[in-house]
Image: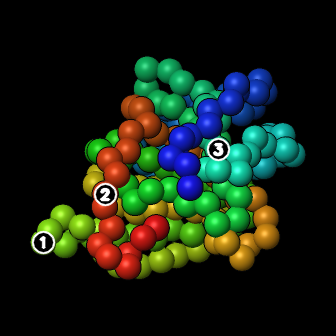
Amino acid sequence: MSSRLVIPDAFPLGEPLAAVFVEAAGAERPEGVARALSGDLASMLPDRVPTDDARYCRTELWRDDRAVALLIAWLPGQFSDIHDHDGVECVFRVVRGVAVERRYALDTEGLARLESEDRFLPGSVIASLGDDIHSLGNDASSGETLVTLHVYRPDARMRVHRAAEGEGA
């Protein structure tokens, strides 16, 4: 699989969605970001979102000095690398499809070992804080595109971790 990320030109934002990002960027705690993302966001997004056969597709929707918001589309079988957010706060909302989050811990050699896996339905809001190590994606058998909306504060960053043998994302 290619390691490139495709970031197409962002599509125009409607006022209601822009207001969500302003509220999320200014929220005092992650719970406030989660509240901002809890409305009917699916109706604010286009029916079709950019996808890429080679890798999940990130579309930057919003950026200011406090936060960045990304729309990410995942075709069946697409997953992120095993990563943490290098201390950046990440809160995401499942807009369409079912998200699979795998959480990892580093062993004594610094390799990532799977600890747990959860599935999140549309409407779920999940926070990844501190140095949580995880991968996120769309189960290969899902048959539908997964769409997630992420807010990173102050910016989107990832530190990729190597998997222990047999522990790939």
| Category of crowding for the residue at label 2, using alpha-carbon neighbours closer than 10 angstroms: few (below 14), some (14–19), many (at least 20) | some
* Closer to us: 35 or 103: 103
132, above or below 151, in the image: below
Q: Position of residue 76 (x, y in %)?
A: 70, 65
Q: Circle 2 — which element?
A: loop
| Category of crowding for the residue at label 3, using alpha-carbon neighbours closer than 10 angstroms: few (below 14), some (14–19), many (at least 20) | many
Q: Is residue 109 left or right of residue 118?
A: left
Q: Position of residue 37 (x, y in %)?
A: 61, 47
2, above or below 22, in the image: below
- Residue depicted at x 46% and y 67%: 169
Residue 22's disc number: none
Q: Which amino acid, by three-letter code, is at mark 3?
A: Cys
Q: Earlier in the sequence, mark 1 or mark 3?
A: 3
* Closer to us: 150 or 161: 161
Q: Circle 3 — which element?
A: strand
Task: Determine if residue 39 is in view.
Answer: no
Q: Position of residue 126 (x, y in %)?
A: 51, 59
Q: Is residue 56 left or right of residue 122?
A: left
Separation of residues labelled 2 and 3 (CA atoms): 20 Å
Q: Quadrant of residue 58?
A: top right
Residue bearing mark 3: 57
Q: Circle 1 — which element?
A: loop
Mark 2 touches mark 1? (CB < 8 Å): no
Q: Earlier in the sequence, mark 2 or mark 1?
A: 1
Residue 161's disc number: 2
Q: Which amino acid, by three-letter code, is at mark 1?
A: Thr
Q: Earlier in the sequence, mark 2 or mark 3?
A: 3
Residue bearing mark 1: 108
Q: Position of residue 148 (x, y in %)?
A: 64, 52
Q: Is residue 6 left or right of residue 106?
A: right
Q: Residue reaching furthest top?
A: 65
- Residue depicted at x 33% and y 67%: 163
